[in-house]
Image: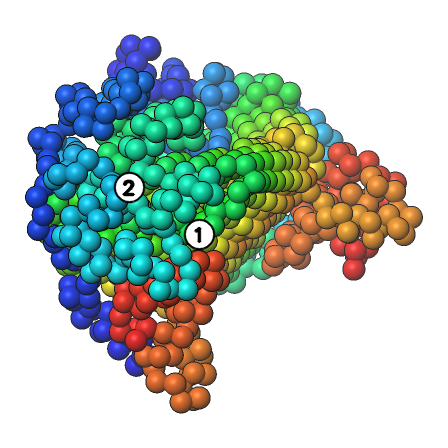
Amino acid sequence: MAATTETIEQVKTLGQEKYKWGFVTDIDMEMAPKGLNEDIIRLISAKKEEPEWLLDWRLKAYRHWLTMEEPHHWAKLSYPKIDYQDTYYYAAPKKKDGPLSLDEVDPELLKTYEKLGIPIKEQEVLAGVRKVAVDAVFDSVSVATTFRDELEKAGVVFLSISEAVRKYPELVKQYLGTVVPHTDNYFAALNAAVFTDGTFVYIPKGVRCPMELSTYFRINAEKTGQFERTLIVADDASYVSYLEGCTAPMRDENQLHAAVVELVALDDAEIKYSTVQNWYPGDENGKGGIYNFVTKRAACRGRNSKVSWTQVETGSAVTWKYPSCILQGDNSVGEFYSVAITNNYQQADTGTKMIHLGKNTRSRIISKGISAGRSNNTYRGLVRIGPKASGARNYTQCDSLLIGDKCGAHTVPYIEARNNSAQVEHEATTAKISEDQLFYCRQRGIPEEEAVALIVNGFCREVLQELPMEFAVEATKLVGISLEGSVG
Amino acid sequence: MSAVTKSETRPAGTALADGFELSRLPGAGNAAVGALRTAARDAFLAAGLPGRRDEAWRYTSLSGLGRESFALPDGKAGTLDVAALEARVLDDVEDALRLAFVDGVFSPALSTGALDAVEGVSIRLLDTVLADGNGLQPGEIVTVEESPLAALSTALMSGGLGLAVPAGVAVERPVHVVFVTTKPGLMTSPRLLIELGDDAKLTVMESYTSLTDAAVFTNAVVEVSLGAGAELGHYKLQNESPAGYHISTQGVVVGDNASYDNFILTLGATLSRNQIRAELGTASLCHLNGGYMIHDRQLADTSSFIHHAQPDANSHQVYKGVIDGQAHGVFAGKIRVAPDAQRTDGYQLNRALLLSDTAEINAKPELEIFADDVKCSHGATAGSLDEDWLFYLRSRGIPLAEAQALLVGAFIEEALETVNHEGVRAALSTHVAAWRGRNMPSSLPADAGAEAIE
């Protein structure tokens, strides 16, 4: 019992200083006026020199958004009403237009990313084991994209989405909004109307992307929302591994992050998408923090295509996020690996949807939820087997771990099977760290705190090992910090 | 009738309550009953039938029910084909006292004894319970707010029993309550009130059937209150006619250290729903189990909610379904563990066997946990018969159809094993075998189920 009590105490004492990414960069910003209306959308579109079709699409989305209702009744989340007029929808560091060569990037920004530990100077990366190309998004715009030459040689398109719209309009137009249409849901509609930047990736036929691609999102300015849009298209028989990370300063106010991620995998293509979400979670009294309302969806359109989502969710005051796979192509595979950790007053409602449409489609869901403090952590998922998905197979495992008696852990899976040759299996467990496990470690001389760390790491292992190596290290550290005290 | 006038603006299905005079229903002399009926009818008229946008009814559409119109029982039982009735429900539980209701009216002729035939349990007709207001009263456990359908049932309740066992009395002889509908287009609202004192013990079996090919609607409410240390075995067979609708709303309060063992076998009705809510006391034990076997275009919906409000309780649920033809199985089970309900042990398993490529299952097993020292798990599976098992049997010369029938029998029998009462288990088992005999023709004896697999 002692260990657990201690853990609870330590978790309680977790102060703000633990969020070391909470600083603010003082930099000249160009902001659009506060509020949301068609003029703001036109302004964003103009700033980005967008073609007419994109502005029309944005306006269509905005008009549709006005008719929609914020989805607050079904998720196990509660937060005050968001005033969509009290937010800046466009905030960009002044000067340069879009990402240029690294020498031209504001040194203030480079310093910021250095402080965050994100390598946007290529030489720093070269010192490492593996190369990672980074697209750094600062508030509303992409500020730097590294390793462009090398990627270009391989034929890989890795650009901020604003730039992609200018350089490859046909490619963007062909896929944008085809996985997450502008009418999809409230936050997706909002994003379609006001998205300011994000990343576009296109991997040509038969190409295995020579390095990990990564986008690092940073919210810096006050009262801004971040609405980025990521679109990744993997053409026939290609492969890409993509990582995304995010942080924000500590503030008393809640900031909105409503992103959309669309993945398209064609025949025999594979996309591995990893996220370490570490937005500011608010302080120990639940004040401040990011509202993370994200729509992520993959279309496995081709035969034998595969999409694998891995997420480590430790940040944000409120998380609403369901990375999903539409398994259209025969033999396509969808995977979802998730660790969600909530502490203090954090709320997370996250999970996945696996929609089996094609024959012999397979999906695997491994979700690990850890709740501490007064937080609530919900897994919400859907596995749907369509009438034509003969031979489809799903395996789902959701485990929850509770630390302390003031938190909640919830599991809400939906299973819809309409094909009798399909097999669906779902398992869920909820428990606390058992005294037996602790005792076993302690009698081998492992101190309580380390024992808890060991057990929690073991609990998450199945998911963490799915991350690319660089991220796995960061994620393991994050797990520690998020539950500091319990995992040493 | 004054509450709503314009028909186009009325919530869906409220016409079901039209034209009924509450004052002509049992208990009219008791003002409290009158007030309850009125409040219940108002609640139903305000809400209407739940629609698919209502999360609890996401997979079950009541639009068919809403289009029907039904008559209330007129106090006279229709003529009964006893042979037909026996085929559908009367594989009587051995030694049980059978009490039968026909078209909402108590039928001494079909019953095997008087109300006071079983020593230790007080059995009174609903009319008496409502008239004198003694004992557990309707609405105490399943309130008007529970659901619109329960409210409709409360407004129109007639026919049913109040069963009470005083503290410390263990009743060995089971009570079998049978509800039969014979008249086409009849809506019955039976009510059972079961109240066990501390350490009391009782076994109750309910059977529902209808003997007409026309649409009928059974809208039952069962309220159960168990004192500390009490033990109730509570079982049910639902074998309504293929055009029947069957909705049952059940509320159970399980006292400290008490034990509640429930099993529901669903075979009949075009649309059926068993909705159970159980509130568990400290260190109590609750088993909610069930099996359903459906085909054609039947829909069988099971919705359970177990509330671990107190520490140290143990809940266990196993639901297994066999779905053939274009039938549709629905399961939604929720376990809620309140902040102080430490050392809760909750288990839930839902398994569905899809026998045809047009069968459908929707399952939503849900855990909502606010205490840390708990052990909760759930599992759900859906799929067809295991190819390896079929191969095993066929390699031994058993034809495919028979191998399938054997495996289906074994699948359901496994769920039946959870029934504590031997006589009840045997009775339910006979019905499972009969279903297989009707729907999965095979030359093997119908009861050659589980043994053959082992």
At which x and y percent is residue A469? 43, 62
At which x and y percent is residue B66? 45, 20
Mark 1–mark 2 Cα distance, whole angstroms, equals 29 Å
Q: Which colour scheme is used?
A: rainbow
SS at mark 2? strand
From the viewer's perspective, tell me whether residue A362 is left or right of residue B9: right
Q: Which residue is drawn at 34% across and 29% down?
A: A167
Q: Which of A130 and A375 is in front in this view?
A: A130
At which x and y percent is residue A393? 61, 45
Q: Which residue is drawn at 70% across and 37% down?
A: B355
Q: Can you tell which mark lies on residue B77?
A: none
From the viewer's perspective, tell me whether residue A28 is left or right of residue B348: left
Amino acid marked by disc 2: Phe
Instruction: Examine the rendering and report whether any part of residue B154 can be seen.
Output: no
At which x and y percent is residue A457? 41, 69
Amino acid marked by disc 1: Met
